[in-house]
Image: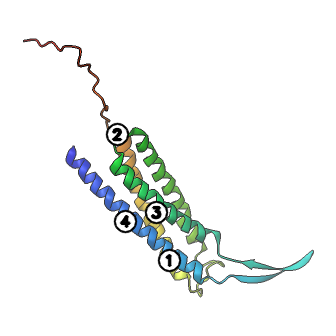
Amino acid sequence: MATNLAANRTIDFILRALQLIFAIIVMETDGYAIHVFHGHTVYEHFEFGDFYNYYGVPDAWGFLMFCAAWTLLGVIFLLIAGISFADHALIGYIRVAVDVVALLPWLAGFIAVDVNIGSNECPAEENGCGSLKAAAVFGALEWLLFVITTIMTIKLVFNSTRRPRTSTTSPAIPILSAA
């Protein structure tokens, strides 16, 4: 049991380190795509009047950047909570919640960015689309890492037996033996 827990912590630490590395890669590639993207102005003609409409960076690209920033904060908390407060029940439930809250936006984020690739927001001739493809791929890998760590955290929190902090027997009560 003790070796299983130690191996589990080692695997958890390695997966959390990969989550941090992939989040940094997503921030860099997505940030580069946002930097390189050139918005464009379109002349719109309607029966009520004409106007110029400016199309800027798509919202999905910023959402993927939010996912990466949330991951940095969440994984740092999960590492600290896993080391320092491993035996607290409430912290265990918070760890599960942070994992789930990180898991779901990554799913939505990489799908939303992937939908933009090849569309009007990111045509094939645009320079930043190559880095956006890399951001979407690393976002999908990040989501898979969070699937694994969320399952591990749920199993660890809900299947573990917690020891009480104080003894349940009173030292004033004598224990009789059969001898």
Q: Nearer the viewer, residue 83 or 141?
A: 83
| Above or below, comparing residue 24 to residue 123 in the picture | above
Which residue is rendered at x = 60% and y = 69% of the image? 62
The mark closer to the camera, 2 or 3, is 3
Do labels 2 and 3 touch, CB within 8 Å?
no
Q: Which residue is mark 4?
A: 18
Which of the two discs, 4 and 3, labels the residue nearer the N terminus? 4
At label 2, the amino acid type is: Asn
Please tell me whether mark 4 sits on a helix, a strand or a loop. helix
Please tell me whether mark 2 sits on a helix, a strand or a loop. helix
The span from disc 2 to disc 1 (Cα, nearest Å) is: 39 Å
Do labels 1 and 4 touch, CB within 8 Å?
no
Which of the two discs, 2 and 1, labels the residue nearer the N terminus? 1
Q: Which residue is mark 2?
A: 159
The span from disc 1 to disc 4 (Cα, nearest Å) is: 16 Å
Q: Nearer the viewer, residue 90 or 15?
A: 90
Q: Which residue is mark 3?
A: 72
The mark closer to the camera, 2 or 1, is 1
Q: From this viewpoint, which residue is outermost toward the left? A: 179
Which of the two discs, 2 and 3, labels the residue nearer the N terminus? 3
Number of marks drawn? 4
The mark closer to the camera, 4 or 2, is 4
Question: In the rendered view, does 57 fall on the left or right side of 14?
Answer: right
Numbered label attached to residue 29: 1
